[in-house]
Image (cartoon, rainbow, N blue to C red):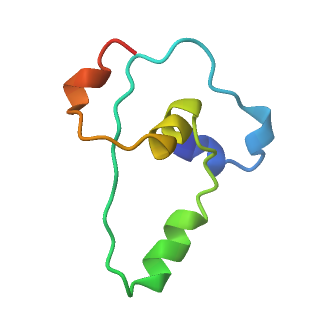
Amino acid sequence: MAGNIANARNPADFRIVGKPLGIEPIAIMIRKDDRAFKGAVDGINIPLSDSLKAAFLSPNDRPAEAYEDR
């Protein structure tokens, strides 16, 4: 949904509201030398969620199941 909003003609016209159905940490890996792909991903312009910001500040090895009650 966030990707669709980011690509909308007027992204400011949309908001994601309500409690999330679920939150789990995910990531992608890209080749170190793939500047075109990195540029495309960086250009999506999706703001970081508070939970992702917290994850960056506190990296850990917990499995996805540890995040089910958040």
- Check the image and report above or below for 3 versus 13: below
Give the percent coordinates (x, y) of residue 60: 31, 40
Q: Residue at x 56, y 65 (%)?
A: 42
Give the percent coordinates (x, y) of residue 4: 56, 44
- Check the image and report above or below for 62 versus 65: below
Left or right of 59, for residue 8: right
Q: Quadrant of residue 48?
A: top right
- Check the image and report above or below for 13 versus 4: above
Which residue, as the protein is rendered here, is positioned at the far bottom?
33
Question: Which image quarter is the C terminus in?
Answer: top left
Give the percent coordinates (x, y) of residue 50: 58, 32
Q: Is residue 1 visible?
A: no
Which of 17/62 is in front?
Answer: 62
Q: Residue at x 50, y 65 (%)?
A: 41
Q: Quadrant of residue 31?
A: bottom left
Left or right of 65, for residue 9: right
Which of 59/41 is in front?
Answer: 59
Give the percent coordinates (x, y) of residue 3: 54, 46
Q: Is residue 13 visible?
A: yes
